Structure formats: C-alpha cells, structure tokens
Image (cartoon, rainbow, N blue to C red):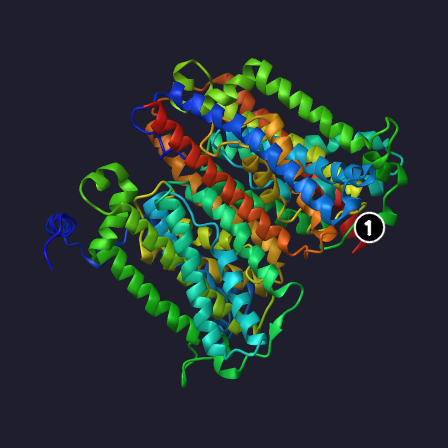
Amino acid sequence: MTAQNPPALGTSPATRRNLLWTLVRFREAGISVFILILVVAITLRSPSFLTVDNFEDILLNISILTIVALAQAMVIITRGIDLSVSSMIGLVAMMVAFVVKEHPEMPVLFAVPLGMALGAVLGTFNGLIITFGKVPPIIATLGTLSIYRGLVFFYSQGTWINSFELPRSFKLLSKGTPLGLPNMVIIAIVVAVVVYYFLNYTRTGRDIFAVGSNPDAAQFAGIRKQRITFLVYLISGLLTGLAAVLWASRFESAQTNTGLGFELQTVAAAVIGGVSTSGGAGTVPGVLLGALLLGIIQNALPLVHISPFWQLAIQGVLILVAVVTDNLIVRRAQRTRK
Amino acid sequence: MTQTPETQSASLIKEFAPRRSFLADFQRWEWLLVLLIVVVIVANTRLSPHFLDARNISRTSSDFMELGLMMLPMAFIIITTASVDLSVASNLGMCASFMGWLFMHGVNIWVAALAALALGTLAGFLNGNLVARLKLSPLVVTLGTYAFYRGVAYVLLGDQAARGYPKAFTYIGQGRIPGTLIPFSVALFVVLAIIFGLILHRTIFGRYTFSIGNNENATLYSGVPVARVKIILFTVSGFMAALAGLVLAARFGSTRPDIGTGLELAVITAAVLGGVDINGGRGTIVGTVLSLLLIGLMRFGMGLLNIQGQVQGIVIGLLLILSILLPNIAQQISSARGVRINWRSALISLGILAVFVLFFLFFFWSRAPVIAGG
C-alpha cells in the first residue's frame, strides 16, 4: 500500500520497528485515557450510560465489529486493506439466510461453518487477484466490493429475508445466553483470544508482521511473502463470513443493503486502535479498544442528545486525528533518537 | 520575474522533451479501447433497436458527466501519487448538500453554488496538505475525509432533501445547448477535458506530474516543488468534485445527503481502465475519455436490457480488476519463457478452480427458490 514510502533515511528497519511499537503502546494508553474521559463526561450528562444493561448493549453492538476489525487489522499489518468486507457480509448473510429459510430441518449450528466457508471462498478470490494478479489491494477490494454487492442483488433479485421467515433457533444463535453472556459476545472474545495467540505466538503470525514491516527483508529471510499475503485475505474472508452469520442472526434479516458502509468502521477501529497503515505494527488489545471507542460513541450520541447523523463525521475526524498523531509521534521520536 | 532554479530546470525539461504528435500519444491501450467501443456499439445495436437513437444517447450521456468531471483530476492524482483520492464522492455529497442547505435557508442559488465550490476547493486543499505536508498516505487521508465529508453532508441535511431549485440552475444538469441535442454538462466536460489534456500533455506542470510519478525523489532533487504540485492536484480534485456535485444536484433537481454515494469506485475505474497506470507515472487524458465513453455505452446498453444498476456494478468491478490484472498476467507470461509444467502448482490451481465451481454451484442451487417464486 505504501511501498513508495520507505523508512526515512538513517533509520534501519529495526529502529523503525521500535518506533512503531512505541507508537502502539502509546496508542493503547492514549486511547484508554480517552475512553475513560469520554465515559466520565457522558455519565455526567446522562447517568443511565454507566449501567450493566447499557454496557451489555455496547458489547453486543461491537461484537461483529470486533471480529471483522481484527481481520482488517491483520490485512493492514501486511500493508494491505480489505474494503470488500461489507459486501462479503451482505452476500454471505443473504446466502446463509436463504439456506436457513429453505431448510429449517438443517441443524442451525451448521450455518456457522457454512458462512465461514462461503466467506473463505470470497476471501480466496481477493487473495488470488492481489497476490498472483499483482493488483494493488485497494483496487482489488474496491472492485470486489462492487462485485460482491452486485451478486447480492443478482442472488436475491432484490427480495429481503424478514424476521418471520427465519427459525427461532437461528435468531437465538447470536443472542442466546446459555453461558451467561450473549453467544456473539463470547464468540468475539474467543476470536480475539485466538487471533492474539496466532499473531504473537505462532510462526505464521510473526511472519505477518515481518511481511508488513519490510516485505523485501522478509522475502530474503525465507518467508513466502505471497503465501502470507494470500493467507490474510483468506482469514479476512473466513472471519467476515462468521460475522455475516451473526449479523443475519442478530438483526433477524438479510437485506440487499446489509453491511453497506461497514468496511469504513472496521478500518476506523483498526487505525484508531493503533494499527499502522504503513504496515508491520498493531495489537489485538489496541483493535479491541478502537472498536470499544466506536461502540461507546455510537451508543452515547442519542443519550447526550446529539443527532446520530453526526456519527459518520466523528468517525472521519477520529481516523484523521489517529493518523496525524501517529505521524507526528513517529517524526518526533525519529528526531530525538538521532 | 527572476529565473528560479525551478523554472530553469523546467525549461530544460521542455527543451529536451521530444515534441510528440497527437497520434504518437495514441498508444496500444487507447486503440484497444477504441476497438472495445466499436464492439460494444455493434453488440448493443443488435441487442436493442433503441440503442442508436440520438435523443436517447443525448439523454444518457449527461448521466456520466459527474463521473467524467471527477475522473480528470483523478487521472492526475494517480499518475503523480500512484494512489487515489477516495474522498471525491463524499466531497461531492458535502458540497451538494451544503448548497442545498444554504438554498433551504433562503440564500440565492448562485451564491450557494459559489459557496459550495469554495467549500469543495477547501476540502481538496485540506486533503492536499495532509498528503504533501505531513507526508501521509493519500489512501488513509482520503479514507478519513471520505467519512468526514459524507458525515458533514448528513449533519447538514439529516433525513431531509433540498429541492425546488430554479430552472436557471437545473439547466446545468438538464439543459441542452440551444439548437442542438448536446447537453450543457457534456459541453462543459468536453471543454474541461481539453483543458486538462493540454495541461497534462503540453505544459511544464504536466511534465512535473509524470516526473513525480516516475521518481519522486529524483524529481524533488531536481528542484521541482513536489509538495506544491500535490497540493494543487488535490485542491483541483476538490474543486472538480464540487462542480460535479452542482451538476448532479442540478440534474436530480434535488439534493439528499447520500447523493453520489459510491461514485468514487466508478471514477477510479474510469481512470484505470483508461490506461492510467495505478503504479504511477503513466496515463493519458485521451485514454480516460475513451474509457468513460466505453463505460457509458456499456451501462446504457445494460440499462436498455433492463439490468439493475447494482448488477451492473458486477461488470464495472470486473472491468476495474481486469484492466489491471490482464496486462499483469500478459507480462508474466511473456517474461516467463520455457516454463516447465509444475504439477504441484497445477494441482493447487485445479483445487482452487474446483472451490470456485462449487461456490457457484451452491450459489445457483440455493438461489433456485427465488427464481421459482418470482
């Protein structure tokens, strides 16, 4: 994505990495403080914000975002971007909802692997275009964003799947609470733990950082760059497929515009959470905090009587603030280290 | 005015750059586009008798002018930065909404339009400064402003729509040049395309554009004000997005905050399909105009065949990907001579192919009830 922006003169890849990690740590602390201030400020204006019920509501709302944002983070760490996630959600949700509706006799748990498999196929398509076709990720996924959305319309012929057409067991898939917390919150936590372990303690996970940090060095070190790049888009499809099933279950419907514009939220959560768009840096806790911040803002706007129409503008400002501060910090750190 | 090092080197560039004829600018890619246009015209004429109707074409052609207006500066930005301005459609929405908002609050429509143009230019200037001064990736910056500008549009209009624009204003989007079938917006586009083409291919500024795209550091060290060039490009892109917003609002006769959503995809597609190299440094305005014509004819033809707009998106998305993918693959094939068949990779390829076949079998199998029902 930013191959034209090599590290500044005089910084070896190693120091550049250290700088980026300082940044990530700073970001986690900074965003935590920001969230705390926000929570206090909102609670002062609207005491009903800081209740268990409302907090559970926020968790429920950010579960899907968290899952996809983690996938998005992995892609961004390799210097890529996956803009097609929103259309993948739309397409997979529609296909799964159709199957569930037409085959109520099917065990409802089957919907989860089905959605993940469908998502993985779409992710494979992205990965192939990007690695073997050498199409820049932004262009490739911008194209599939449009293709997959078109397929949704082609598939459903413009019809919707409504709540009454879906079996109750499918709707409970995301919202049931057999373990105390809603299932989707637990699924999101499991995904976060697995991704955390994968990124930090497996060889492939470390390779993802290596490829993002310095693609050429990674290649010389014997890492198969193409394969890692392909893998992150595959994972992105897989996790987005899972998110799509949860989406259809939570909102009890599949519509032609399901997920429209969602890609922006996932990128926002990752970037605000400190995932560097120049690749090679990012953490799972950071992404979780980024998603939490977006969730709190979304939840609090109506409570403090601000029109929900402000949400998109605030998101944009947060992305800009995040990248500009990153940039300033890296520059300052570079100057002081010389 | 004294000669600064910049103008000196520029005059050198001018002296040594070979004068090329118009036809020499016409490269293989442009001829391919011409061929495709002919194919599309022939195919569509056979598929629908209404395709070659002058009134129809006149009416449809204005549908693509917003796209064209934003495509011209986008070509410059891709050539220079090897990146794109993702915020153009949001900027269009913000400016159109701002104009509508002012109009609803009793401001004269022309004053409102001028204010919208100023806002768009300012928005582009902001993009340019973030990119050039802070050295941020254009993609990330314009992704942020993509959300921000569209957000402002929603903040301004909410769930309302501005309407009731006077006829003199809607002429920009709906009117024709008196005595002809040529829509005003098409004439506007043609004039601007010629201006942009001349700037890109016949001026020092145009040479700077290519030079930065080919080797930014070398260009910087030869005294070209790289940052200033980039800021100018993004500012112009903002202005053109605002202009496209006025044209689109005039064509619809109303403004909703979601006006032009998703148009950035079509703009980028048009530029890239027109032979503008996504890796920077190469491209022609003639190519982009031809690709706009091709996309317009294809969409018009699909519209006559009653294909839904979103399904047309499949074709546009494929076009975008294929226009980069095919040249890449062709290059790979031509550079890999005498490759022996690698059984392992052949097996993997077959496996992946099987997965896609299975996907589409499932796609059509599970979709069967839709077709049976509707």
Residue A232 visible in image:
yes
Q: Hey, which quadrant is residue A58 in on the image?
A: top right
Q: In this view, does A329 lie above or below A228?
A: below
Quarter of the figure with residue B293: bottom left
For the view shown, which residue lies furthest in the bottom direction? B179
User: Of A313 and B327, which appears nearest the observer?
Assistant: A313
* Lateral position of residue B185 relative to residue A311, left or right: left
* Kind of residue indicated by mark 1: Asn
| Residue at 38% from the left image edge and 53% from the top image edge | B234
Give the vertical position of B196 relative to B86 (above or below).
Answer: below
Image coords of residue A218 (percent x, y)? 43, 18
Would residue A236 be visible to someone looking at this image?
Answer: no
> Circle 1: is it few (<14), some (14-19), or many (20+) Cα within 10 Å?
some
Residue B302, image quadrant: bottom right
**Residue A168 image point, x, y percent:** 89, 40
Q: Is disc 1 placed on a helix, strand or loop?
A: loop
Residue A36 at x, y percent in the picture: 66, 36
- Answer left or right for B213 relative to B333: left
Question: Where is the N terminus of chain A found, in terms of image quarters?
Answer: top left
Residue at 62% across, 32% down: A32
Q: Mark 1 points at which residue?
A: A162
Q: Is residue B10 left or right of residue B69?
A: left
Q: Residue at x 67, y 26 (%)?
A: A192
Q: Determine the residue positioned at 44% across, 76% down.
A: B183
- Please, is residue B364 above or below residue B297 in the view? above
Q: Mark 1 lies on which chain?
A: A
- How many numbered circles does the render carry? 1
User: Which one is in front, A20 or A166?
Assistant: A20
Position of the C terminus of chain A, as image quadrant, is: top left
On screen, B56 above or below A279?
below
Measured as percent of width and height from the top left, residue B312 is found at 57, 55
